Image (tube, rainbow, N blue to C red):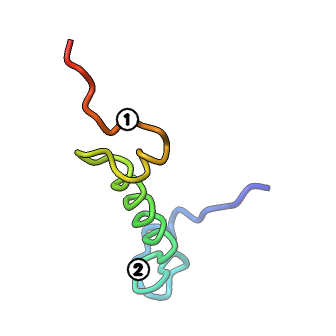
Amino acid sequence: MRTTICALALTDETPGSAYWYTAGVNRAGVIALVAGTAAAALYVSTQLGPLARTAGESTSPSPSE
């Protein structure tokens, strides 16, 4: 099933437009962005975050060649 998109409505910035959401902000999109950023921040950090440790990543620095 394909969804149709009205390209003209995408450029409509008025509150009554089809893509206005809540004051112009898509709450589900913001929640997904924050959750993804938080997960990435837990995994990638200077000391290898808690998710990296649970994934079995080494917490000690790798030896230099």
Circle 2 SS class = loop
> Which of the 4 image quadrants contains residue 42?
bottom left
User: Amino acid under label 1?
Assistant: Ser
Q: Residue at x 46, y 71 (%)?
A: 31
The residue lying toward the viewer, choosing from 10 and 26, is 26
Using the image, tell me which numbered label, if any, was put on residue 45.
none
Q: Position of residue 19 (x, y in %)?
A: 51, 75
Which residue carries the number 2 mark? 24
**Which quadrant of the rendered structure holds the N terminus?**
bottom right
Within 10 Å of disc 1 (Cα), the crowding (few <14, some 14-19, many 20+) is few
Q: Quadrant of residue 61?
A: top left
Q: Is residue 61 above or below residue 5?
A: above
Q: Position of residue 49 (x, y in %)?
A: 34, 50
Residue at point 27%, 48% (across, down): 45
Question: In this figure, which residue is indicated by the disc labeled 1?
Answer: 58
Q: What is the spatial separation of the Cα atoms under label 2 and label 1, in whole angstroms?
A: 43 Å
Labels in figure, total: 2
Pick out the residue farthest to the top: 65
Which numbered disc, 2 or 1, marks the residue that appears first in the sequence? 2
On screen, residue 50 above or below 26: above
Residue name at image x 47 percent, y 39 percent: 56
